[in-house]
Image (cartoon, rainbow, N blue to C red):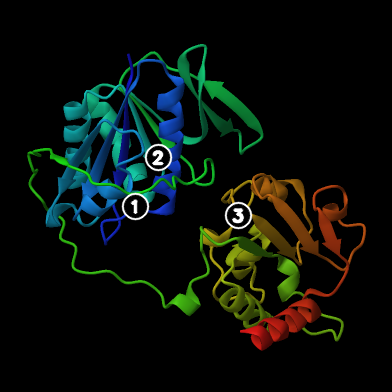
Amino acid sequence: METILFLAFTEADGSLGQLALETLSAAQSLATSLTGSKFVAGLIGATVQPAAEAIATSGVVRLLGVSGVEFAQSRYSTDAAAAEAIAKSAGATIILAPAGSRANRTLAGVAQRLGGRIDTHVTALAATDGKPAVTRWYYRQRMEGVLSRSSRPWIVLLESGCAPAYAGPAGSATVEGVLVALPHIRTEVTGLKSPPADQQTIRPDAKLLLVAGAGWTKKQPDGQAHAAEAEQLILGFLQQAQASLGSTKSLVDLSGEGQAVLKFMTHLNQVGQTGSTPRHQKGLATCCHGEEPHTVGWRFINERRAINLNAACSWAQGKADVLYVADAFEVLRKVNALLGATS
């Protein structure tokens, strides 16, 4: 009999984020599919009661928690100790966690402490012939593999956008506190620094992903490059549409070639074979060609559109649902004006 542990770190207010709720939904489905399985939840954070009440009706038979100021911030030593203690208390054989920054940096070490195994970047969970199986991509998202393990405990980190977020009603919850032997804490969190909201360009939960290609910094019909205007147009669109920003490798590498660059663009924005593989509902590619290394990163975008002056570009070869044959500068000028008029 499997004991499935949903393990998550709470937000600052004690709630669960979108990715955690998606993972809970996947864990709930797996527990239902495996006959005789036991479904347990483990929560870690400064406070866990709000999260416990939010998932009280999800079918979990036990709610375990580790809370306190020591667990408010991401720190390997305390996070690993808390996760290990919860896993042992639950007697977990399968541990499902959202692939957020805290879990990604911590749970591989926890798997070693527990004598188990871990699989990351998982995109689907299912029960096959009465056994749990996970799906993940290999070779830069070109090959999909389905695998299962006999080793226990088995830790699985689920990527975002792979399951609908849990939306069950809240209820009353009693959290079983788990004692943790705190290690010697050598890291002190003195505060958080984040960019203003209007400067944030990476928004994983945004419905729309705008991808900018190197064409934004090339010479325009007047024979001149207009990188400064390109920055204003792109940032204006991101702010008004609350979209996320992606980029091609060619654009983020331009700074090393002595060419004009977009100052806010970094390798963190890179999408494609050597970048990220986002899961936004819609994607709009501008001034890029839609070559394979780039479109690999669009594999999980539900609706793909592109703006390009070349009607025969790669986007037109079945890689985009809609291709607008137009000048991206002119299009964004008009769109930004319309967004400003309706805001």
Amino acid type at circle 2 is Leu
Measure how far apart labels 3 and 2 are at the Cα level.
20 Å
Q: Amino acid at mark 1?
A: Leu
Tell me where residue 324 appears, x and y as whole percent: 85, 66
Vertical placement of residue 35 versus 117, above or below: above
What residue is disc 2 on?
A: 24
Q: CA distance from mark 3 to mark 1?
A: 20 Å
Q: Residues within 10 Å of mark 3 (few under 14, many from 20)?
A: many
Q: Is residue 280 above or below residue 162?
A: below
Total numbered badges shown on the rendered structure:
3
Quadrant assignment, res 316: bottom right
Is the C-beta separation of discs 2 and 1 under 8 Å?
A: yes
Q: Secondary structure at mark 2?
A: helix
Q: Secondary structure at mark 3?
A: loop
Tell me if mark 1 has few (under 14), some (14-19) or many (20+) residues whose alpha carbon lies within 10 angstroms of its own.
many
Q: Earlier along the polypeptide chain: callout 3 or callout 1?
A: 1
- Whichever of callouts 2 and 1 sits on the residue coming sooner in the sequence is 1
Is the C terminus in the top left, top right, bottom left or bottom right quadrant?
bottom right
Residue ID at (37%, 50%): 101
Residue at coordinates 56% horizontally, 23% vertically from top-left? 146
Q: Please indicate, yes or no, whether residue 68 appears anywhere in the rendered image.
A: yes
Residue 74 visible here: no
Residue 280 image label: 3
